[in-house]
Image: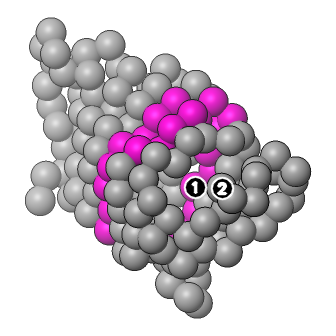
Amino acid sequence: MIEAFDLDNEYFKSADGVLFSADMEKLIAYPAGKKDKTYVVPEGVRTIMPLAFGYNKNLQELTLPQGLEGIGQYAFAKSTGIKRLEFPPSLSVISGAAVFEQLGTREEPLELVFNGLPVIENENAFSTAVIHAFVPAGEWPEEKMQTYGGEVLWTEQ
């Protein structure tokens, strides 16, 4: 399994072993074999691309930056070490299916903390995940609080 990327050209750049677009606005791939337990996504990253964190079993704590706008399909799929994600208010879209595939269990659901109101584009965005989602009180319409193909408990806070 890949533990680090090392490249710097007109299209891609790596930082701390993680692959980005050259302008550092897109996080393309966090290596599945990277051993770190924590990672802070750099400021300036606007998009987490499809499968970017997929299949990494070591990562437990992930800090997402202010200014993050989009998260792609399968972005965190099978990254079973992740137990909690807090999304900045800037997050505007979660696209694609199975973004959190196979994360969380009934005994320990994946905690998702939303600080804004992103568009969840796919009815299966939470497919095969067990999630406890926290949303700002009074801001999320009830029809938006669906299962999205997973098991989801919605809590307003």
Q: Main secondary structure of the magenta part?
A: loop
Tell me the quarter of the image containing the N terminus.
bottom left
Q: Of marks 1 and 2, which one's residue comes earlier in the chain?
A: 1
Residue 84 placement (x, y as % from top left): 58, 62
Disc 1 versus disc 2: nearer the observer? 2
Residue 60 placement (x, y as % from top left): 47, 63
Q: Is residue 114 magenta?
A: no
Reading the image, the residue beneath label 1 is 85
Q: Quadrant of residue 100?
A: bottom left
Tell me the quarter of the image containing the C terminus.
bottom right
Q: Which residues are magenta?
A: 69-95
Residue 3 lies left or right of residue 56; in this view the side is: left
Which residue appears at 71% of the width and 40% of the height? Answer: 116
Q: Secondary structure at mark 2?
A: helix
Q: Is residue 25 above or below residue 57?
A: above
Reading the image, the residue beneath label 2 is 144
Q: Is residue 33 above or below residue 81?
A: above
Q: Quadrant of residue 129?
A: bottom left
Which residue appears at 35% of the width and 57% of the height? Answer: 97
Residue 71 lies left or right of residue 8; in this view the side is: right
Q: Amino acid at mark 2?
A: Lys
Q: Amino acid at mark 1?
A: Leu
Q: Nearer the viewer, residue 94 or 82?
A: 94
Number of marks in picture:
2
Q: Secondary structure at mark 1?
A: strand
